[in-house]
Amino acid sequence: MVFRLLRPDSKSVWNIQEIANRFSRYKGIMEGHKVARFLIAKTIFAEFNESFSEQQLEGLLEDKSDEFRELLTLDQEEIDSRKIQKSNYLDLAAAIANKYLEKCIFCERKCGINRIEKQKGYCYLTSDSFVSSAFLHMGEESVLVPSGTIFFQGCNFGCVFCQNYDISQAWKGKRKIGDIAKKVDCIQLANIADRLAEKGAFNINYVGGDPIPNIHTILGSLNHQKSNICQLWNSNFYLTSKSLSLLIDLMDFWLPDFKYGNNECAEKYSGVKNYYDIITRNLKRIHDEGSGEIIVRHLVMPNHIECCSKPILDYISKEVPNCVVNIMAQYRPMYKASNFKEINRTPSMQEMHEVKNYADNLGILWEPVS
Ligand code: SF4
């Protein structure tokens, strides 16, 4: 295929045994002998109706999650023989997401506003989701290429150095969102995903901005998606525990950012509280309870090696050792970064070497995906 010519490392990376071992289920889905998690969830019957309270729905979700995990132990033939249920685990997760939308608690900003009634919180999005672009991305990590990437408009962060500020921030209050991105409902989003799969994508990569404000639309689309394809969550990962409970069984692959090694730097540059506590909590959970197939993206920032890069790598090696890490040199002082002297430059060669050497000394696997 053409993409193998454009990115030969997307093939050769699978010759690295440790990569094949850590991403074995993802590889199995790519090769067609494993089934994506959301397709398994379609076979789990979930009986509920509109009279159910939020608490009742959450209780049912826990039961269905237990059922789901038992199914993961079945062999492929047994999974293939199961029937799709009319009312299933995916419907349940989407119904809960729509409840959360009425007092939005998708991310840890917990704005508490009713997005269904068109109220806007920090991310400035009502219940409508907008896709700014969707295409086969050849620039993602080697194992992910070609990636069926869907960029959502809007973000729950306010990074002063944002490289995508046109889709995350710059439109707020200035231009109509519909002029710069296409409004999509669940069925339209599913059609976009299926088209990307038909074109040869190895995964459906939800990104932005950030996908977190769009959890309801993404979950709602899964029941309409037809392709057996890996579902990938590519996010700042500042979502609440409740939101993560909706996704944790359904995502096959995780691509969380891990930018800051403490809460203070995160508050200063991204305007979020308790960042380190929340990211480590979520990361630990997907590592221990989710698919565990994870590439952590760490963007190396100038003058932030001691306070951010090293503590992050220490944490990963101790607490979530199966993560592979993309040590990223792509930081550029965009958007409002010039207001902060210490980050108003790219990271130096020496800083990048220092971070990579530190990762090597901790035994972290990073090179094949960086
Ligand atoms: S997703 Fe948006 S509205 Fe909801 S809590 Fe986060 S920033 Fe607020």
Image (spheres, rainbow, N blue to C red):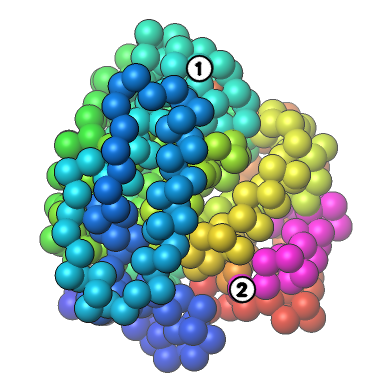
Any magenta on residue 323?
no
Boundaries of the magenta span: 300-322
Any magenta on residue 317?
yes
Q: Residues within 10 Å of mark 2 (few under 14, many from 20)?
A: many
On the image, numbered disc 2 is attached to which residue? 322
Residue toward you, 228 or 362: 228
Q: Is residue 322 visible?
A: yes
On the image, numbered disc 1 is attached to which residue? 103
Q: Is residue 222 visible?
A: no
The amino acid pointed to by label 2 is Asn
Judge left or right: residue 361 versus residue 22: right
The x, y position of residue 348, in whole percent, is: 73, 61
Instruction: Kindly tell me whether mark 2's CB lies below 8 Å from ligand 1.
Output: no
Residue toward you, 278 or 59: 59
Judge left or right: residue 119 versus residue 310: left
Q: Quadrant of the N terminus?
A: bottom left
Residue drawn at (56%, 32%) of the image? 107
The amino acid pointed to by label 1 is Lys
